[in-house]
Amino acid sequence: MDKNSALEASIAKRSNEIAQLRAEQRPLTLEIEKLEATLQALKVKDKAITRELREFEIDRFMWNYELNHNLKDKKKATEASTSKGLPADILS
């Protein structure tokens, strides 16, 4: 076998190997693209949930603040009325 024939055989073999690897790679590339799209959708959903959680936590904080403020006001009113001789249950 002369040198050119050996090179042609090596080129043909390598071309077949390249074609085989590309054939293996195609479905992997498609799967990666699908997974990336799914990941992007999950990130959008996660961001929306995070935003809603933040809003809910703010609501809860504000309601707790309001509740504590109302309880303090009621306690002060009760203390004031009992110090003036009024029954505590009038304010309830």
Image (cartoon, grey):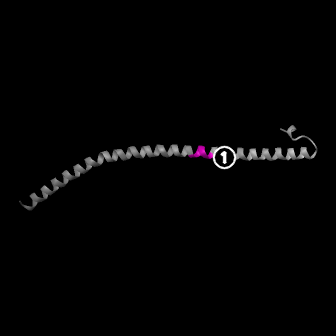
Q: Quadrant of residue 38?
A: top left
Residue located 20% across and 52% down the image:
17
Q: Classify 68 as above or below 2.
A: above
Q: Which residues are magenta?
A: 50-54
Left of 30 or right of it: where is 91? right
* Quadrant including the N terminus: bottom left
Which residue is painted at 67% across and 45% down in the image?
A: 60
Instruction: Please check the rendered image and state whether residue 52 is part of the magenta-colored stretch, yes or no.
Output: yes
Say if 83 sits above or below 90 in the image.
below
Q: Residue at x 86, y 38 (%)?
A: 89
| Most distant residue in the left direction | 1
| Front residue (pair 72, 11) | 72
The secondary structure type at the circle numbered 1 is: helix
Q: Quadrant of residue 49?
A: top right
Name the residue at the right extreme.
Answer: 84
Between residue 48 and residue 14, name the one nearer to us.
48
The residue pinned by badge 1 equals 58
10 lies above or below 34: below
Magenta span: predominant SS is: helix
Q: Amino acid at mark 1?
A: Ile
Left or right of 78? Residue 59 is: left
Pinpoint residue 19: horizontal percent, then vertical percent: 22, 49
- Name which residue lies at 90% across and 45% down: 82
